[in-house]
Image (spheres, rainbow, N blue to C red):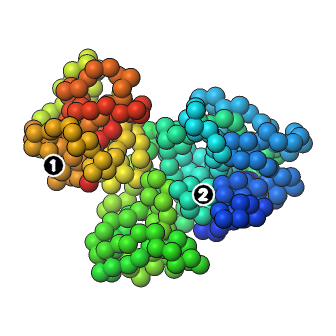
Amino acid sequence: MTNAYKIAQQYAGQCLDFDGYPRDQPYQCVDLVMMVARQFGFELWGNGNQIGTIGDLSPWVEIIPYTEGMKLKTGDIFSTDDEPGAEEYGHTFVYGGGDLSNALIVEQNYQHQCTVEHRRAVVGYGNRILRIVRIKNQDNYEPTDANGVKVGNAKETDKFIARDFFEITCDKVEGIKSPGDSTVIETFYKCNKVTGNINGEWLIYDKYDGSVAYIPISCVKKLDDYSTTKKEEKKKYETPNGYDWFTDKTTDGIDQSGTQKIYSLAQFVSLGRIKEANYEWTYSAGSSFPENVQVPGKGFNAYGFLSDGDGNIIMSAPKTYGDIIGRTYNTPFGFKGKVYTTNDKTSFDVYVR
């Protein structure tokens, strides 16, 4: 017996088609879990939101309805759905460990890519976890990196991604869909910074949103100083990045005194979503900020955050927070933030370059 995650890892970088369906888009998320299940002597069928519901699977698996905070295991297969009212096909993947704000997973057809192993936030991005399909009698398995360091058991307080930063060294290089598919996913230029993992002759560029591009290693160099594999110590600060100190309480009375992490923009982009300073934080492209919202002195600061003329990071707040336009908050980025508009998320959204 082996572990479902260990099997799934072997498919990373491959475009899997288990059932030949649909013909125009054969590489679906379910193909990966179907391939994994076949290795254990049974089959999983259905859309991503149906995995674990079709047929009698009791000889091989436990079907566990998901509850927040439940104990997860390496090798668990997730069946998820979109937000209520937008359900269609759902999504499925294999879990390798870590808090769901930064889980290690193997999946296919996330952002229309082939199979990839990476970290991303599972919750808060349109995914509702429906159930866990847990294959019985699996071996205990803990994923490790090339140096033998365990990478699957990151806790919520260890939100840094176990991968490396690289700099593009060629004047121009195209990141392609896979070694066997020269479709251009993104074009990179000298001095661009990217995150990812080396796999043979390729750097697999793995963005926060699941986008993947293969870049020849001859055009990249590793940046050890940017490494996110090491957890930073919490810092007590009075003048973060040269700005005002953080007061003990925000304008809505939330206590934020004492120590607090500061995340660089690179770390934040890699994580996608973080929980710090009593709130959740996400980001959007600065170009998406509403044009009809007037912000005096609006522009990007030296650290890549869209800010106002007073140095506050420009933020949108969840509509559920009520009327808080104009309030300022402490942020985990070394600057205060000011709310200028609202969003439909559950997080403060900041705008970045």
Return the residue at label 2.
Answer: 109
* Element class at badge 2: loop
Compute the Cα span from label 1 to label 2. 36 Å
Q: Position of residue 49 (x, y in %)?
A: 68, 42
Instruction: Residue at 78%, 45% (x, y): give it.
Output: 135
* Element class at badge 1: strand
Indicate the amino acid at tag 1: Gly
Q: Position of residue 13 (x, y in %)?
A: 60, 68
> Which quadrant of the view contains residue 90?
top right
Q: Is residue 120 above or below residue 212?
A: above
So how many labels did they put on this image?
Answer: 2
Quick check: 169 left or right of 39? Answer: left
Residue 265 image label: none
Instruction: Residue at 28%, 20% (x, y): give it.
Output: 323
Q: Is residue 100 visible?
A: no
Q: Is residue 126 visible?
A: yes
> Which quadrant of the view contains residue 295?
top left
Return the residue at label 1.
Answer: 299
Indicate the amino acid at tag 2: Asn
> Which quadrant of the view contains residue 113?
bottom right
